[in-house]
Image (tube, rainbow, N blue to C red):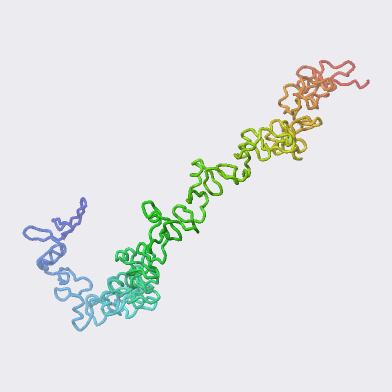
Amino acid sequence: MFILIACVLLSCWVEVGTYRCPSTAPLYFPNLWNNCISAQECRRKSFVVYERTCVHSCPPGTFYQQEASTCYNTCPVHTIRIGSRCLNGTYCVSNNNQVLFNGTCVPSCPSSAPFTKDGVCRKECPADTVTNKSDCVSPSDCVVRGYFIDNTTCVKACPPEKQSILQGVCHSSCPPDKSVTVNGTACLSKQECTDKLGHFIYNNTCVPECPPTAMFSDQGSCTALCPKEKCVLGTDCILVTECVSRNSVIFRNECIAACPAEAPHAIDNVCYSTCPKDYVLDNETCIGLQQCISTRGLFKVIFNNTCVDSCPHEAPLNHQGMCVQSCPDDTVVEDMQCVDSSMCLHSSRFISNGTCVSKCPGRSPYLANGYCYPACPKDFVVTTPGQFQCISESECVKLKKMVFNRTCTAACPKESPYRLHNTCILECPHNTSIFPGNKCVSPSECPTMKDAVMYNGSCLPTCPSFAPYVHSRNCLSKCPTGFFAKGSDCLNNYNCQNVLYNGSCLSSCPKEAPNRKDKNCYSICPSETYSYQATCIDDNDCLEKKFYLFNGSCVPTCPSGSAGFTDYICQPNQGL
């Protein structure tokens, strides 16, 4: 029978002769309506399958296999033909306890097909079976018999290197999701150990009870200590919130009914021997700090972690509701209260010896930045002689005044006429120089002084006569190379608009050096240059003029008495 299978537009069809059936029901069923039918539906109707047709019975010349309810032209492999039937290996087993090989019943399987499955000799066991000696059995049959599966073999015991057993299969170690062992061999999940068996997990082993070294159970796992967020109830670790929901309290990480005498105070369901941080004792009860000192609370003070009506004499001062012996830094005493220093100063009052006062006392009459002192503090001076107001020395200087005898004064007195850093002194130090206004100036201050100069390590208002020239604010006896003197200043030669001679900038060259080249004057022109009308030129410039070179000069004609010229160079008379 001609059969063609075709798929068109993602739908598969089977052509049975001249009739097309879908791939979901590929058998032709030649009844009144010529239906298509599946193999399962064909067998359910007690029909048999022959090629691609569902028929009532096998056609003549074909062979019937009952297990498959199928007609064959020749019996398939692993069956034996008996009459018009194809029988499996059980036929041979039931007849003289033989086995089926190559379509024939034989006493035993040959070495080329040593394994048997359902009475049929095979070269190897099917993939869904394991070997039990020469038999191919299902894994479940192997385990039901009390045996174990090692790779593809059914064995009486797992080998030493595979002592972990999961569902009858030998493993070198339990898999991650079945990491708990029972009796050292069987692999279970944690849930199977705790929920199914009602046991506990200790060191990845399922045990009936936790050992003394890890006696507490945290979600079925044995532990020596409960986690931080949990506490002990009996031998179980429970959440702290669960303990609280039971109206119980926690003492030493144990959930109990009431606090013991050694820790009688319960705060947030935790027992304390003394009131914890931010709590104080009031009538044998721990209350919050704010509840004790707040105006909306008891409006009391705290001494020795206890809420009291007033501060005792050993700690008489009140600092933010706490009784203290002395006020902390940045606070001062006012009416036995510790108040912020700025609050005292901003209220037009002063601070004397850590106390807020309206007037400085006689023992500390001097006032500086709101504080009272016996004398003006360091770096401060009296504003005016006879007064008690102190200002900083820098503030005195800003007022363009001087400091004398720790007093801000308009001018230095005769007994201390000199000024050093705006302080009046008797005489200038040896390493300073006297400037106008009797000011003592050190070398380090020299760069900041206008027109000041340096000589021999000293800062001077002007240069001495033996070193009158100024270069980079230093006094020199003469200007350095590349500079010329203009008055007392050394200027760069580029600044000379005329000519330079002997370190000076002149309007013209002098008689002793009348020849000019660039900006310099020479008595004799430099090498390879020639004098022409008081200017030094090179030989090419002279020759362009059709002049002659003679004795360092460019002349219009050779002088009389010369021996003529060669290449415009006058030759001397050798006979003279």
- Report if residue 537 is visible in the image: no
Estimate the x, y position of residue 327 in percent, counting from the top left.
Answer: 51, 52
**Is 303 on the left or on the right of 393, as rendered?**
left
| Extreme residue toward the right, this view | 576
Q: Choose top left, top right, bottom left or bottom right for residue 569.
A: top right
| Extreme residue toward the front, this view | 362
Estimate the x, y position of residue 492 in percent, counting from the top left.
Answer: 72, 28
Q: Observer-nearest residue: 20 or 217?
A: 217
Q: Choose top left, top right, bottom left or bottom right for residue 264.
A: bottom left
| Extreme residue toward the bottom, this view | 96
Residue located at (76% from left, 17% from top)? 545
Determine whether 176 is above or below 325 in the image. below
Estimate the x, y position of residue 315 in percent, counting from the top left.
Answer: 49, 57
Residue located at (19% from left, 53% from top)? 11
Figure quadrant of the N terminus: bottom left
Determine whether 319 is above or below 150 in the image. above
- Report if residue 495 is visible in the image: yes
Q: Observer-nearest residue: 28 or 357?
A: 357
Q: Observer-nearest residue: 554 or 286?
A: 286
Figure quadrant of the C terminus: top right
Q: How many marks?
A: 0
Residue located at (18% from left, 82% from top)? 95
**Is 299 on the left or on the right of 448, as rendered?**
left
| Extreme residue toward the left, this view | 32
Determine whether 232 is above or below 527 in the image. below
Estimate the x, y position of residue 283 in percent, counting from the top left.
Answer: 38, 62
